[in-house]
Image: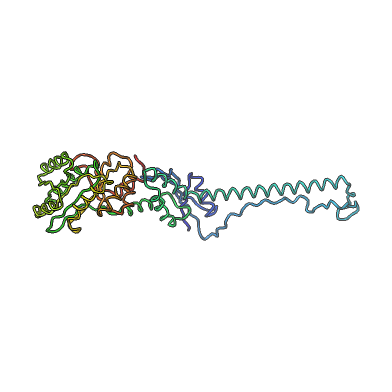
Amino acid sequence: MIIKKFQADTETEAIMLAKEELGKDAIVMNIKTISPKGIYKLFRKAFVEITAAVDDTVTQQPAAKKEFTVPEKTGFKLNPNIIYDKNDSSLGGKEKKTAEEKNDATAIEKKLNSLQELLEKQLKDKQLEEKSEEKKKEGKNPIYVQLIYNQLVRNEMDEKYVNQILNEIENKFKKDASIDDILSNVYQKIILKLGQPQTVELLDNKAKLVFFIGPTGVGKTTTIAKIASGLKLNRKAKVAMLTSDTYRIAAVEQLRIYANILGVPMKVIYTEDEINEAREEFKDHDVILVDTAGRSHKNRGQRDDIEKLIHSVNEEDREVYLVLSATTKYKDLIRITESYSEITNYRLIFTKLDETISVGNIFNIKMLTNADLSYTTYGQNVPDDISKIDTQETAKKLLGGND
């Protein structure tokens, strides 16, 4: 017994597909309507799936194509160039053909020839129609890919990264691949490219310095307070805080308030020498979080100050996090990340996720910098509105729209 499943928009179409492939003796064993779920519902509608079977002991003959032939009218063809004698035995003793009868015979042949041409044209048109239907079926794959492309671009993913993903999966599918298969592979590709997020790591028997850099107004100080709270409450780490943001008195006072609430020491530093003194002072701590001033990425002198501060600590003893706002324009994010890449390697933190409906820039900047993702924040509440970036949720948002 041969058992196969067939899918189509309607029950009738699915049964016809089964009969065409398995033959007229095929039996429909099961019929069900399948509705898409999750992120797939954006691209496809419900369809019918039937299970059909046929006894494989019966030789299945494919249905012969219908051909059009000219019906035989007389059993012989009249030759218009001959006038037949009435005594001719081949005509059964009929009278000789007249010129008028000769013309009638010619007219009949013309009609038959016209009929032949008409039927041949109909056959040709039918074959063209069948080829057109085949092309439509073959075209489903490109249509699905185009829908996914539009969705990713709509969510502000850079077109070059969208094309990169789609090109990488292109050869994995047959022309009739389903939207489910294509979506699943794109989803997995996005997750793989986002990578495994990395958060603050603690050293054994040694204080690690964690620097937070980035432009003004992205929420560095609040983010530091959230991370400090999580380290102390969830990991029982011994935390200290430093700030070199002496350009804004309000920023120093804000960090001091957070330090008092959390019950952790806090110190203001001005030079790279003072950071080494602070390291000695807090050497019995697990981690020292350092808030830096929000400097313009266009100002080379300001960037030099941050670079000196960071490089006063050995690479194995430090981590650096570039804090970016998810609401910043992509072109500006490119300039900011390229500027800080000249200073040091870093991990990425995205803030203000609650203020935007698009997460495309998270993927774009990850691909541009090849830096590890880490935290994301989505509100002002300390310590609640922060978490490690959820790459699966990010991929779903990119593919599933903004709802």
Q: Position of residue 173 (x, y in %)?
A: 44, 55
Asked whether the viewer can see residue 8, the reply is yes
Asked whether the viewer can see residue 388, the reply is no
Q: How is the image coloured?
A: rainbow
Q: Position of residue 34 (x, y in %)?
A: 41, 45
Q: Is residue 92 left or right of residue 233?
A: right
Of 157 and 210, nearer the camera is 210
Q: Is residue 122 left or right of residue 256?
A: right
Q: Residue at x 59, y 47 (%)?
A: 129
> In the picture, residue 36 is in which quadrant?
top left
Q: Is residue 385 left or right of residue 42?
A: left
Q: Residue at x 68, y 48 (%)?
A: 119
Q: Position of residue 16 (x, y in %)?
A: 53, 48
Q: Residue at x 47, y 47 (%)?
A: 143
Q: Is residue 134 left or right of residue 49?
A: right
Q: Work out which residue is located at the far front of the displayed protein and give it.
A: 301
Of 173 and 210, nearer the camera is 210
Count of all numbered marks drawn on residues in the image: 0
Q: Position of residue 109 (x, y in %)?
A: 78, 49
Of 220 and 244, nearer the camera is 244
The quadrant in which the C terminus is found is: top left
Of 279 and 31, nearer the camera is 279
